[in-house]
Image: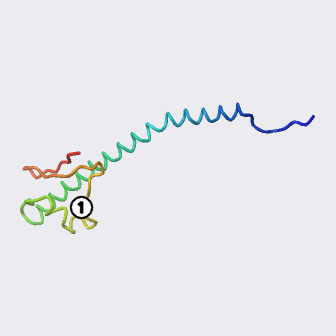
Amino acid sequence: MKNKRGITLVELLIVVMILGALAAIALPRITQSASNARQRACDTNVSLINSSIEMYFIDTGSYPALLTNVTDNATYFPDGAPSCPLGGTYSMNANHRVTCNH
């Protein structure tokens, strides 16, 4: 009698079920990590813009009247103005500090 080697349908179903369970556990964590990364990128952009406003003050002796005076300036942002990865917009308040409205 020959012994055939291979996997049975039951073994294949068990492997598929295990992979499905692992995917169900991992997927929420991956999406949460992506959301956290976008939030941190927005916070970094806000910090970068605030630093650029202070550099503008040092360079000119006054704070910018508009946020675009800094963000559209190639001296401070040679690669262009940063955009919020969460879809919000950056705005400057009366104290010359930037916030994001996402």
Could you say whether the residue bearing mark 1 is in a helix, strand or loop?
A: loop
Task: Give the side of residue 74 with respect to residue 20, left or right.
Answer: left
Q: Amino acid at mark 1?
A: Ala
The residue under the point 70% across, 32% down is 11
Q: Give above or below for 26 relative to 58.
A: above
Apparent side of residue 37 relative to residue 52 in the rendered image (left or right):
right
Which residue corresponds to mark 1? 81
Residue 76, percent across and down? 21, 64
Compared to residue 74, the image places residue 92 above or below, namely above
Query: As rendered, which of 51 and 49 lies closer to the eye?
Result: 49
Quadrant of residue 63 in the image?
bottom left
Q: Quadrant of the C terminus?
A: top left
Q: Is residue 89 left or right of residue 31?
A: left
Q: Is residue 81 above or below residue 18?
A: below
Q: Position of residue 96 (x, y in %)?
A: 10, 52
Q: How is the image coloured?
A: rainbow
For the N terminus, the image quarter is: top right
Q: Position of residue 85 (x, y in %)?
A: 30, 51
Q: Could you say which quadrant of the image residue 58 lies in?
A: bottom left
Residue 3 position in % (x across, y down): 87, 36
Q: How many marks?
A: 1
Q: Residue at x 41, y 41 (%)?
A: 31
